[in-house]
Each structure stands twice: as C-alpha cells, then as structure tokens.
Image (tube, rainbow, N blue to C red):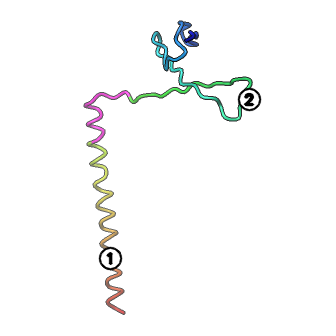
Amino acid sequence: MALIKCPECGAQVSELARACPNCGYAFGAVTVEGADEKKGVIQGVVVNDINMTFSSMVSFMIKWALATIPAAIILAGIFFFLTGFFAWLMARM
C-alpha cells in the first residue's frame, strides 16, 4: 500500500482512501472521456450536499405540497370537462 500526496493540503494519504482525512478532499477521480490514456488526465468529482436545517426542509415540503393543490384542481376540472364533453358526444350519436 503506497502513500500519495493530497493535492489540496499536501498530507500523505493512503492510495486506497476515498477522501483526505485531513481536509476532506475527495479522491473519487475519473478519467476524462476523450483524453489520451497515456497522459493520465484525471478530473476530480465533487458532490455538494444540500445544507438545510430540519425545520427549513419541513417548511419547504409543506409549501411544495400546498403548491400542488391548484394544479390538482385544474387537472381534475379538465378531466371532468373532457369526460362530460365526450359523454355528450357519445349521447348524440
């Protein structure tokens, strides 16, 4: 098992580590498509997390649920209008 140097902080880290224990730099690197394999062009992948408190998340979900009510009413109105219209057309035949 070899040690590698973290590109972010310079600490010595195991080559098997997924992130630097010192600074948290993610080593989840992938080869860039179309890059020359001999040059070993590597680009790091960084995943950002949503930073919300629990109460903010609950508030967001309640607002989202309330925002769906008008859309559901509109869709139900369109459905009932179309079914009534087609029932009226079928009755005329």
Q: Which residue is mark 1?
A: 83
Q: Is residue 43 above or below residue 72?
A: above
Name the one closer to the observer, 47 or 38: 38
Residue at disc 1, secondary structure: helix
Queried whether the magenta region covers residue 41, the answer comes back as no
Q: Residues within 10 Å of mark 2 (few under 14, many from 20)?
A: few
Residue at disc 2, secondary structure: loop
Q: Residue at x 26, y 37 (%)?
A: 59
| Residue range corresponding to the magenta coloring | 51-61
Name the one closer to the observer, 1 or 8: 1
The residue under label 1 is which amino acid type?
Answer: Thr
The residue under label 2 is which amino acid type?
Answer: Asp
Q: Quadrant of the C terminus?
A: bottom left
Point out residue 88 in the picture as x, y percentages from the top left corner.
32, 85
Q: Residues within 10 Å of mark 1 (few under 14, many from 20)?
A: few
- Residue 91 occupies which quadrant of the picture? bottom left
Q: Quadrant of the N terminus?
A: top right
- Residue 75 occupies which quadrant of the picture? bottom left
Q: CA distance from mark 2 to mark 1?
A: 60 Å
Q: Residue at x 51, y 26 (%)?
A: 46
Q: Residue at x 30, y 38 (%)?
A: 60
As drawn, the label of residue 26 is: none
Q: Majority secondary structure of the magenta segment?
A: helix
* Mark sitting earlier along the chain (2/1): 2
Name the one closer to the observer, 92 or 4: 4
Q: Is residue 65 above or below residue 47?
A: below
Point out residue 74 in the picture as x, y percentages from the top left corner.
32, 62
As drawn, the label of residue 36 is: 2
Q: Residue at x 35, y 75 (%)?
A: 82
